[in-house]
Image (cartoon, grey):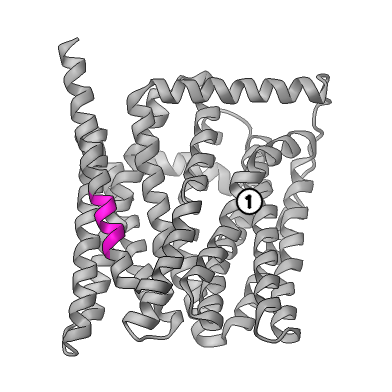
Amino acid sequence: MVEAQKGFLPLFRNRNFMLLWSAQAVALTAYHGIQFVQIVLIEKLTRSSIQIAIMILAFTLPAVFFSPLAGVVVDRLPKAWVLVASNALRTVIVLGYILALRVLPEGLYLLLAIYILTFLASAIGQFFVPAEVAALPLVVGKGHKLLSANALFNLTLIVTQMAGLVILAPLAVKILGVPRSFLVIGVMYLLATLLVFFIPRDVPRPRKNSQARAIRRVWEEIMESWRFVTSHHPVYLAILQSSLVITLILIMALLAPGFATRVLHLPAEDAVLVFAPAGIGVFLTIILMGRFGHLVPRQVLTNGGLLALALTLLILTWVSGRAARSPDFPVITMVSLLSFFLGAEMAAVNIPAQTLVQERTPEEMRGRVLALYFMFANGIGILPMLTIGAAADTFGILPVMAFVATIVLLLAVASAWRSWRYHKLLLLD
């Protein structure tokens, strides 16, 4: 505890760090909160899983398309300018939601306006995180202070996910309604804009290489990292496992509002009953992983977590179907409990998988491999999202949940078999 205080206390005395950290906390809470508000809004307007899938794609696709461009922009402009512009523009876009809901009647044009605003807000958000991370060494320096700052920023990322998605947005929608929830989020983005406005400006170094040469070099490095991933079985398998979990999280976000309204017969905003226990499970697993995770091999955790995840999904489907036949069945309690285990199992796969990728990748290409991993993890879920959204509207949510659980179970068994086979080959060598 004393060591932690020695690491964090100097940061809390650093005015510029506190401005940047506070802006991160406020902006990321708003970012995660608005996702919940958007999904609830589409469920209320359409009661369609395919429309929710389009909404999720609207704020997922920019991570695939704009991440490389964001890195180039951040390297060439003052970080503080990028931070101010990204938050200010998102403030304006959030006000656009309120205007659209007031001016446009329910129907195609309102949906198009919501999807376009969501895509634009997410695209702008891709520039905030790299600029923020790149600004850290400028405000705290290097060495142990930077290590402590990164630890604090990562913890804040987890806390803001829970605060925005599980606490703030559901409460705002429940108490204030959807339009005023957008107003609260707009105020938060405005506050983040004001906080980063006072951070000192840096002066980027001029680039001597031509744009064509720079583009060729970037492409060569991307291909080099791809060859590394495909030729190193543990890294490749870990990326696939983590990508499966991220896709499953998106599928849960897609199905949760419809699950609440069409299966549990609750208001759409009560999808928090599905989200909240999962968030608690993730949080507790993070704590346990940090304390005891080193005692269990990484691949045992990932394969065991995937198998448990598939079984929990199958049980959740059975419980939900049983509730439809037995009105007295305590379905809400059971769903909340199973949601807790789902969150814990997802974290039990994702954390060791990401750690394995970091450990097995050489330092000189770690950043490229992680960037490739994030692009792959976000891109791989696009087709399943559209397919599952359409299937949920056609066949119902519970049959789709059973199908997804079966696919996850098959992939978990295949993953465990591949890991065992690879380990056996190593022993033979």
Q: Which residues are magenta?
A: 402-409
* Residue 134 placement (x, y as % from top left): 65, 37
Q: Is residue 270 visible?
A: yes
Q: Is residue 236 left or right of residue 418?
A: right
Rendered residue at 63%/51% (across/down): 62
* Residue 334 placement (x, y as % from top left): 21, 74
Rendered residue at 37%/49% (across/down): 245
Crowd around label 1: few <14 · some 14–19 · many ≥20 (10 Å): many
Q: Is residue 15 visible?
A: no
Q: Nearer the viewer, residue 376 or 396?
A: 396
Q: Nearer the viewer, residue 183 or 303?
A: 303
Rendered residue at 73%/34% (across/down): 75
Q: Secondary structure at mark 1?
A: helix
Quadrant of image for the N terminus: top left
Quadrant of image for the C terminus: top left
Magenta stretch: dominant secondary structure: helix
Q: Is residue 52 left or right of residue 426?
A: right
Residue at the extreme bottom: 327
Q: Is residue 31 left or right of residue 266?
A: right
Q: Is residue 393 magenta?
A: no
Q: Nearer the viewer, residue 4 or 119?
A: 119
State how many labels appear: 1
Q: Nearer the viewer, residue 423 or 76?
A: 423
Residue at the extreme front: 394
Rendered residue at 56%/78% (across/down): 41
Q: Quadrant of residue 178?
A: bottom right
Q: Quadrant of residue 72?
A: top right
Q: Quadrant of residue 270?
A: bottom left
* Residue 268 placement (x, y as % from top left): 45, 81
List the residue tagged with mark 1: 62
* Residue 94 placement (x, y as % from top left): 70, 70
Residue 398 to residue 282: above or below: below
